[in-house]
Image (spheres, rainbow, N blue to C red):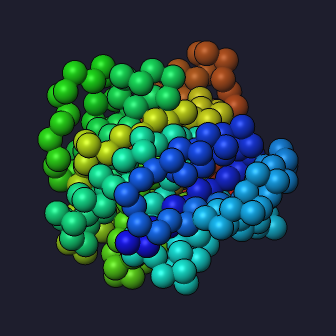
Amino acid sequence: MKFAVILVNYNGKKYNTACIASLCAAHDIGEMKIIVVDNASQDGSVELLREQYGGEERVELIALDDNYGFSYANNVGIRRAEDWGADYVLLLNNDTEIEPDMPMRLEECAQRHPDSMIIPKIYYSDDRKRLWSAGGSVSPVIRKVRHIGLNETDAGQYERETEIGFATGCCLFIPMAVIRRAGVLDERFFLYYEDTEYSFRLQKLGIHIYYCPQAVMYHKVGASTKGADSPLCAYYIARNWLLCNRLHLGWRYPVFLLYYTVNRIVCCLLWLAQGKAALVHATLRGVGDYRRQRFGRSKDYR
């Protein structure tokens, strides 16, 4: 097996070393290449990566000249992995660490479910018995996604390998054959909802998504985006949630739009009561840019 890991870095200097070290400690995975795609970081990430891994054949750095977003950078890595001849790609957040047998477990699951996308069990990095994701589910009408097991203590309740409706972009194990059929990530999203859109796209094509509980990793949640309670997050969620569901909901989109309107109004009222007017402004900008069909990177939220 030729196995390519794609790490997108944006000012993640303090996370890359631990992530790459955990990948290098992985075993029974065949031939591995770690492709780090840097989105024009300004924190010395590129310099440190070159210093640490300049002589390491398994680690390749691609330094972009600007911040083109999560989807674009992953797509650069995917195309490099294809040129290298990878059988599988693992899209992995760089603010994570993996168990040494995680890639092997993912590949075993992929063998049981050919031409499917696979995701692992994900714990919080600072509380390694508390779950962040044991797969993802999708509501039946408005297609709202959620993490299964979020914030639960793991007591063995999610140990069954099962098909799921949504895969988080924190870690996606994808056969190259699936990418050739479904395409790469949609670069209009820049940040957030690219994983939801990709999950929905695969399902439209009849491609399955499986949760593999034997594969385990740990996530420093929100490290790259300063957490969910930020104008950056509010803007891209407001805009990209609309875009994703407009692409995939069909006749259910008006029902979703009613829910979305109520949901965002309630959030904005709460933010105003908390003195967080910047989140309200970002949300309104996101909705406005969706209506104007302005996608990709916002000049104000980057």
> For residue 209, which quarter of the picture?
bottom left
Q: Nearer the viewer, residue 31 or 293?
A: 31
Specify the farthest residue to the top.
274
Residue 70 in view: no
Is 85 on the left or on the right of 234, as rendered?
left
Residue 189 image position (x, y, % from top left)? 55, 60
Residue 266 in view: yes
Query: Residue at horizontal 59%, vertical 45%?
Result: 21
Residue 144 image position (x, y, % from top left)? 31, 45
Query: Residue at horizontal 25%, vertical 42%?
Result: 213
Label tally? 0
Q: Nearer the viewer, residue 130 or 84?
A: 84
Query: Residue at horizontal 19%, vertical 27%?
Result: 156
Residue 258 image position (x, y, % from top left)? 34, 45
> For residue 232, which quarter of the picture?
top right
> For residue 50, which quarter of the picture?
bottom right
Is 262 on the left or on the right of 149, as rendered?
right
Residue 178 image position (x, y, % from top left)? 33, 75
Q: Nearer the viewer, residue 111 or 117?
A: 111
Is 123 on the left or on the right of 76, as rendered?
left
| Residue 270 against residue 200 in the figure, above or below | above
| Residue 279 against residue 283 in the figure, above or below | above
- Tell me the quadrant of the picture where the N terminus can be found: bottom left
Query: Residue at horizontal 61%, vertical 15%?
Result: 274
